[in-house]
Image (cartoon, grey):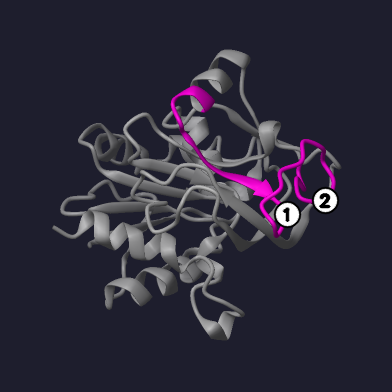
Amino acid sequence: MKAAIVVFPGTNRERDMAIALKRVTGHAPRMVWHHETDLTGVDLVVLPGGFSYGDYLRCGAMAAHSPIMPAVRAHADKGGHILGVCNGFQILTETGLLPGALLRNANLRFLSQDCHLRVEAEATPFTHRWKKGDVFRAPLAHGDGNYTADPATLEALEGEGRIAFRYADAKGRVQADDTGCNPNGSVNSIAGIVSKNNRICGMMPHPEDLVDPLMGGEDGLPLFEGLVEALVR
């Protein structure tokens, strides 16, 4: 699997993502500066976390207009796979590659903590290493992770099985409020979604930060192992 990680001014999670991808592929992914426009030969494009352009205007809004983004969109149009984590998820919504928006956390505080995610959709390249209902731990670090969408979009996401992950407690129980296991107040406790063709995934927590025992666990490793299984032909 050939992966490329897009680096914007203010990105700060590209090295974490590179560690995770190297763990499952055996080789370092390609780092692509946002002024580049060539993604030839890439199977997976990753938009990592951070604060692209200092999160000015809206999180991800300026990055959505970077020179690399037409190539990212072309990659998507050709059926390529894209993973956007945290700021990467925000960028995907700003470009329209995924629906909805990420608003300020309901408690108006920046959150840096572990959370638990319940797997909602198992038939995607990003989740097929888990079973529906499985629960895993992942760190989160964001101030604008409160997912929202209009009622029609939410109905489509729910009806089409495009909710990839929900915030839950360690036993998989989901709460609707902005305390406890729904830390940022996301509607329907949504932590991650996929595109209609299941080839684009956006999520706020950071699975790349739990892929080795030295990191405190390997909870996020199945996501990356599953991508290799799905994309290596």
Q: Which of these two is toward me, 127 or 72?
A: 127
Query: In the rendered view of the protein, which quadrant contains the N terminus?
Result: bottom left
- Residue at 42% x, 46% y: name it: 122
Query: In the rendered view of the protein, which quadrant contains the C terminus?
Result: bottom left
| Residue sticking out furthest to the bottom | 214
- Residue at 70% x, 60% y: name it: 170
| Residue sticking out furthest to the top | 152
Residue 227: quarter of image = bottom left
* SS state under label 1: loop
Query: Can you say whether 163 is above or below 232 in the image?
Result: above
Amino acid type at circle 1 is Asp
Does residue 51 appear in the picture of this structure? no
Within the magenta stretch, is there residue 171?
yes
Q: Position of residue 27 (x, y in %)?
A: 27, 76
- Residue at 52% x, 31% y: name it: 94
In-image side of 66 versus 51 (left or right): left
Counting labels gives 2
Q: Position of residue 134 (x, y in %)?
A: 54, 55
- Residue at 67% x, 47% y: name it: 167
Query: Can you say whether 41 is above or below 197 in the image?
Result: below
Extent of the magenta region: 158-184
In-image side of 78 versus 98 (left or right): left
Q: Are marks 2 and 1 in contact (CB under 8 Å)?
A: yes
* SS state under label 2: loop
Which SS type dominates the magenta stretch? loop
CA distance for labels 2 and 1:
8 Å
The residue indicated by pointer 1 is 169
Dot 1, how many residues are within 10 Å of its Cα: few (below 14), some (14-19), or many (20+)?
some
Residue 74: quarter of image = top left
The residue indicated by pointer 2 is 180
In-image side of 33 versus 86 (left or right): left
